[in-house]
């Protein structure tokens, strides 16, 4: 690791620790100490897990697609999540156990996302088809379809029921189901650990398909493996807190600006740290400045949307 990158990693680590400490102890006194930590520690842990999952999956996805303005949300996973929650409320009502019981909702959401992804992969990659851009196109079309169906049902839903759906549509760290943190931790750690053995291959894949194949990489097999990991990480993060569309785009591109190395082990650490800083910093802003008037996902998506437009214009002017 270069000296400059080491300094960047150290600065990001210190910044993350400062934000974590601030989040834990701002407004805490001897009276509410235990209660405050009881409420805040699960939030911190959930933000770290979510940041790691979304940031790392976005880094892998951009390497696999060889495109720095794409994120896993283009596969339609976020739209499917919102459609699932809307459909459950539309058919069964907000009092249904599938909505009120976080554990059941988590399992159904994860299974549905994995089944959807498996069907798409089987459809696209059957008969020797290996075009990942076809997969992305199908993901965009499915995402648009899901959004249309969601909007249709939301128009028909009772306003009181719609409030429940609206809460599910935005990522929130205020009511974390602590029962899900352990399971989510295992899945995320296993996925990142699995990818760790392939980081050097991902370094080669970042050169492009033809170059990677010439250097001996089984490119298509690696793409399939990495896409499965991407879907798992994205599904767990989305089912845990809700969709945050532009977080991955924002943190990965900032990491590429801060970290000069092309190596994924360094980029991965930088991306995860920036994700943690963004989420905890955003949540601090929401709680201390905005007084819970807006959710952290709205702030991140707003900034991420502006940054996305900047990246598109930058690529266009090249």
Image (tube, rainbow, N blue to C red):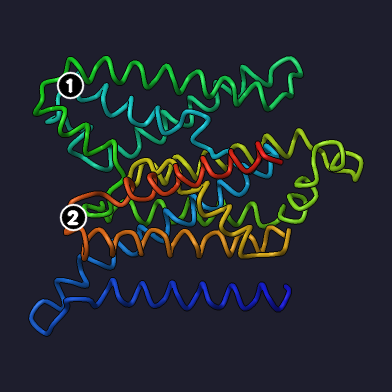
> Which x, y percent locates residue 272?
52, 60
Name the outermost residue toward the bottom.
Answer: 30
Q: Is 40 located above or below residue 68 in the figure?
A: below
Q: Is 107 located above or below residue 49 in the figure?
A: above
Q: Residue at x 37, y 40 (%)?
A: 243
Q: Is 16 located above or below residue 52 in the figure?
A: below
Left or right, 292 with respect to 248, comes to left
The front one of 114 and 59 is 59
Q: Residue at x 45, y 23 (%)?
A: 143
Left or right, 86 with respect to 264, comes to left
Quarter occupied by residue 246: top left
- Dividing the image into 4 quarters, which one contains the C terminus? top right
Judge the density around disc 2: few (<14), some (14-19), many (≥20) Cα neighbours within 10 Å: some
Specify which label sits upstream in the sequence, 1 or 2.
1
**Residue 92, labelled with which disc?**
1
Left or right, 21 with respect to 156, comes to right
Q: Secondary structure at mark 1?
A: helix
CB under 8 Å between discs 1 and 2: no
Q: Residue at x 58, y 44 (%)?
A: 311
């Amino acid at each position: 690791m270069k000296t400059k990158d080491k300094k960047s990693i150290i600065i990001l680590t210190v910044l993350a620790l400062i934000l974590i400490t601030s989040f834990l102890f701002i407004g805490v006194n001897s009276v509410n100490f235990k209660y405050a930590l009881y409420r805040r520690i699960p939030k911190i842990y959930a933000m770290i897990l979510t940041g790691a999952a979304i940031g790392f999956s976005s880094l892998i996805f951009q390497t696999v697609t060889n495109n720095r303005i794409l994120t896993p949300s283009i596969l339609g996973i976020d739209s499917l999540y919102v459609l699932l929650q809307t459909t459950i409320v539309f058919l069964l009502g907000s009092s249904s156990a599938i909505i009120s019981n976080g554990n059941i909702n988590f399992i159904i959401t994860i299974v549905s996302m994995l089944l959807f992804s498996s069907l798409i992969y089987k459809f696209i990659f059957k008969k020797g088809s290996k075009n990942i851009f076809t997969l992305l196109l199908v993901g965009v079309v499915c995402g648009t379809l899901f959004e249309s169906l969601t909007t249709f049902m939301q128009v028909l839903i009772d306003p009181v029921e719609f409030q429940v759906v609206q809460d599910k549509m935005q990522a929130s760290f205020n009511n974390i189901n602590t029962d899900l943190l352990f399971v989510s931790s295992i899945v995320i750690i296993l996925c990142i650990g699995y990818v760790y053995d392939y980081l050097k291959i991902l370094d080669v894949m970042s050169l492009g398909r033809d170059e990677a194949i010439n250097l001996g990489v089984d490119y298509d097999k690696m793409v399939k493996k990495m896409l499965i990991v991407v879907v798992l990480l994205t599904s767990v993060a989305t089912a845990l807190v809700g969709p945050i569309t532009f977080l991955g785009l924002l943190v990965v591109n900032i990491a590429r600006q801060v970290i000069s190395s092309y190596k994924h082990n360094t980029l991965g650490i930088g991306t995860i740290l920036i994700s943690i800083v963004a989420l905890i910093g955003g949540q601090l802003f929401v709680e201390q400045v905005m007084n819970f008037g807006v959710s952290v996902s709205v702030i991140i998506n707003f900034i991420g949307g502006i940054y996305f437009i900047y990246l598109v214009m930058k690529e266009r002017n090249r």
